[in-house]
Amino acid sequence: MPTPLRTSAIILLGLVLSACGPASDPSAGGGADAGESKAPLAIVATTGMIADTVRAVAGEHAQVTALMGPGVDPHLYKPTRADIAAVNAADATFYNGLLLEGKMTDLFVRAATSGRKVFAVTELIDEARLLEPEQFQGHYDPHVWMDPGTWLVCVDAVREQMTLLDPAHGEEYAANAAAYKDQLAELDAYALQVLASVPQRSRVLVTAHDAFNYFGDRYTYEVVGIQGISTESEAGVRDIERIVSLIAERDIRAVFTESTVSRRNVEALVAGARARGQDCSIGGSLFSDAMGAPGTYEGTYVGMIDHNITTIARALGGDAPPKGLNGRLATQTAAPTRAAP
């Protein structure tokens, strides 16, 4: 059921993009004859997770450029002149939506109104699956990639739009998407297994900001973020004290930093917990709003989520292989921290 949480900017963006959807014009990339050879489509994606998904679906038929690399926070990202030029020159741009790239909204609106093709990968997700935590102040949580099952819907959105852009290769896009979804289903099954091995009382995930709600909802973990939905929000002394009290009361042995967020607040939690006599340490760094380095396993969506799952499970006392689902994690994750009986 629609709620008033959609801001006027996002409503406007949706209307504009709907009005400027894929056309049947051959110059749009989908009008070539089936046997005609043509250059790969030029695709722009905002985040690495989206770029990796588009590459998996499009295969050799697209050259995909990600605007945001490792360590880049999409909540704070402002488009550069080069980004604007890339979007204007691309055959299509894929973005997350749900206000993740809030500072890029104007760019997307301008591109769409000038006839460019701009698509939100979250557009097919049923609103019933979207989370609206109270602290998000009337907005849906945009971090949908933290649940591989929900990200499957985004894969379908990419396949659908790629087929509209380039119908001549629609069967290939469907086959690629199906194979990729099989990988995500395997990833989800692995997560269910190893995360369930963590003792029930230890299934509390404390991180730098609220990026893991879909993870918590899918795998039944309590999730506590020091900052809110966006890293623009600031954590106060009372926030730190409240979470330190929770760590002590629940005997939480590990908390986690994030690759795109300062470690300062998490380190303050550890120091505060230890001052109370609580044995607590940093269990590892998680990938939240960006993936790992290009060319690495962690620089793929599957590798990113595998790293997070494995790191969390082992740090909280669960049973997971040090090198993860596919034995490809670049560095061995921390040894398990066993909770007191």
Image (spheres, grey):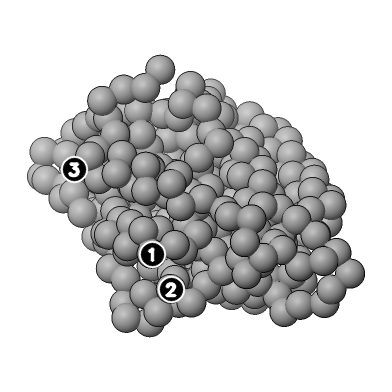
Q: Are marks 2 and 1 in contact (CB under 8 Å)?
A: yes
Tell me which label, 3 or 1, sits earlier in the chain: 1
Report which residue position mark 3 lands on.
240
Going by the picture, which residue comes out furthest to the front? Answer: 25
Q: Which residue is mark 2?
A: 88
Label 1 Cα crowd, 10 Å radius (few <14 / some 14-19 / many 20+): few
In the image, residue 42 above or below residue 26: below
Q: Quadrant of residue 23?
A: bottom right
Which residue is pictured at 28% across the width and 68% down the height? 78
| Amino acid, disc 1 | Ser
Mark 1 highlights which residue? 114
What x and y, as percent, mark residue 303? Answer: 65, 58
Q: Position of residue 317 (x, y in %)?
A: 56, 39
Q: Is residue 44 left or right of residue 85?
A: right
85 left or right, relative to 229: right
Residue 117 seen from this side: yes
Query: Disc 2 residue type?
Result: Asn
- Label 2 sits on a secondary structure element that is helix
Locate residue 310 relative to residue 283 in the image: left or right.
Answer: right
Of 275 and 94, which appears nearest the observer? Answer: 94
Which residue corresponds to the image point at 29% horizontal and 44% vertical from the top-left?
12
Query: Label 3 vs label 1: CA separation?
Result: 47 Å
Q: Secondary structure at mark 1?
A: loop
Question: Is 290 rendered above or below residue 247?
Answer: below
- Is residue 286 at all visible to an observer of this figure? no
